[in-house]
Amino acid sequence: MPGTKITYDSGESYTGHWNSEGRRHGTGMLSFSDQTVFRGKFQDGFFHGLGVLSFKDGSRYEGNFENGKYNGLGIFTNTSGMKYEGEFKDGKPEGQGLITFSDGTHGLPRNEGRFQGGKCVQRKKASDIVKKAQHDAALAKSVAEQAN
């Protein structure tokens, strides 16, 4: 059923591709009743692969997903404009990354390095990972445009 739109009793709607078991699979757009929207790749019903998750408050994640969670490289930007660019695991910043505040600064001391539990635990350059995260976020935006 490629390109099929389904509206659920909950108010959520999905437009996109399905697998033979009737699960969201391939490129699609899922709109939640709280105005959160995911545009990107699905696998067996979950966000999986590249995509963009936009929240009602204006915050968004652009990058890789695995089994419905931020996983791999990506960029999360909150409503104030602060962003984390880097590695994610199980929906949280985990690994190499960089925090940039809305005024363009990175904090003192600089919030760049290895993140664990949402905190920078080892300060070191992460420019290679940040560039890869920016690349994957751009690819995710491209995939998301295809889902419209």
Image (spheres, rainbow, N blue to C red):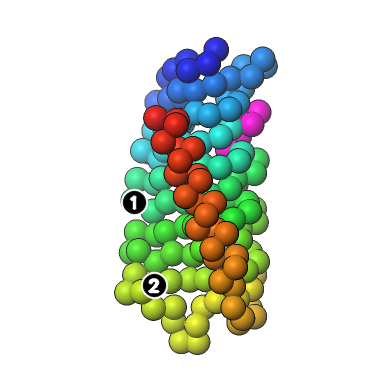
In the rendered view, tell whether residue 93 sits above or below residue 53: below
Residue 54: x, y in percent?
41, 45
Looking at the rendering, in which quadrant would you find the N terminus?
Answer: top right
Q: Is residue 146 left or right of residue 2?
A: left
* Precedes in sequence: disc 2 or disc 1: 1
Residue 116 is situated, as x and y percent measured from the top left of the image, at 64, 70
On whether residue 46 falls in the magenta region, the answer is yes
Q: Which residue is mark 2?
A: 101
Q: Which residue is mark 1?
A: 58
Report the side of 135 relative to 122 (left or right): left
Give above or below for 123 relative to 83. below
SS class, disc 1: loop
Tag in front: 2 or 1: 2
Give the residue displayed 40% in from the left and 26% down from the top: 11
Region rendered in magenta: 43-47
x then y, percent, for residue 101? 39, 72
Foreground of the two, 108 or 90: 108
Residue at 57%, 59% in the rendered image: 132
